[in-house]
Image: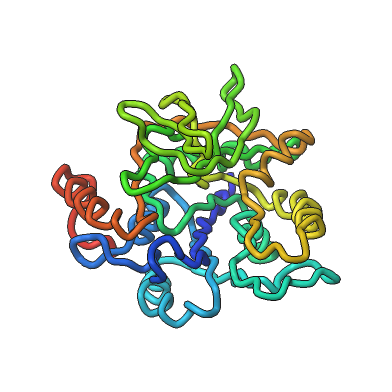
Amino acid sequence: MEKVKTSLVVMAAGIGSRFGGGIKQLEPVGPNGEIIMDYSIHDALAAGFDRVVFIIRRAIEKDFKEIIGDRISKVCEIAYVYQENSAIPEGIAVPDGRTKPYGTGHAALCCKGVVNEPFAIINADDYYGRECFKLIHDYLVSTADKKDPVCFCMAGFYVKNTLSENGGVSRGLCQVDENGFLADVTETHNIVPNGTGVAVKTEEGLVEISPESYASMNMWGLTPAFFDRTEAGFEEFLKNLGKDDIKSEFYLPRAIDTMLKEGLATVKVLPTDEKWFGVTYREDKPGVVDAFKKLYATGVYSGKLF
């Protein structure tokens, strides 16, 4: 049987405003100066992925290639995709003053024509854990010949394992059916620790949610069918924006949820006990550095990754 080729797509075009204006994806956190992407790429290649596709902005291209791209090109095939606000359907104008990217759903769509095989897509500034890459790779390979509805998957983190001590986080909160498939995903903002529990911070106060709820961390396993089946939704999103709206985003969970509702795809939730960590806020960095020290101390990693 011919080997199924798979790609890892890394979304690294975010502006990083909450991080204080720096390029948070390129912050060193490991003992040898590694950045979080180094660990994700290392774990993905170990799981069987064949190449890496970086989604970036041209404004950070030089720094990005110097810090990570040129290094990774020596160990595997790589490609670049550029998420720019000009990359939208013809006939739709970008509002004056819009500098913020159009979101993770748009970032994924920018890969059309570059990614023609099953792929995992992740955030650049999140650490997911080694198990998750193996789970997604193996599912993509096992369902590669399924056509309709197309078979997607996602790493199902428990929301209690995805929080920051330094502020609210945004997660796709998931409902899962009795067969382990995603039934609904809702992008939810300002999720915070609340004692031993978890809550959503609203204008009216804290709303408790189950710590065992599944959360999407934008770690999805998708196929090229995603592109054609999402383009219309993105165009509709743009047409419905107010002429002065310079902040709204087209989120990847929203795009996938629409496909679910229309019966165009299934999404298998792959549960994991891995604990997420990442540099959402500048204050997160010391904790991330300590977390990697523990991973080395327990033998998860050793020496240089590449």
Q: Nearer the viewer, residue 27 or 149?
A: 27
Q: Residue at x 38, y 60 (%)?
A: 37
Q: Name the residue at the front extreme.
A: 204
| Residue 172 image offset from top left, x and y in percent | 55, 40
Q: Residue at x 50, y 45 (%)?
A: 170
Can the viewer see residue 137? no
Q: Residue at x 52, y 34 (%)?
A: 204
Depicted 120 relative to depicted 205: above or below = below
Q: Name the residue at the right extreme.
A: 91
Depicted 206 relative to depicted 171: above or below = above
| Residue 57 image offset from top left, x and y in percent | 54, 73
Figure quadrant of residue 151: top right
Can the viewer see residue 32? yes
Q: Nearer the viewer, residue 172 or 177?
A: 172
Q: Nearer the viewer, residue 134 or 245?
A: 245
Q: Would you say 111 lies left or right of 38 here?
A: right
| Residue 63 image offset from top left, x and y in percent | 41, 79
How is the protein colored in the picture? rainbow
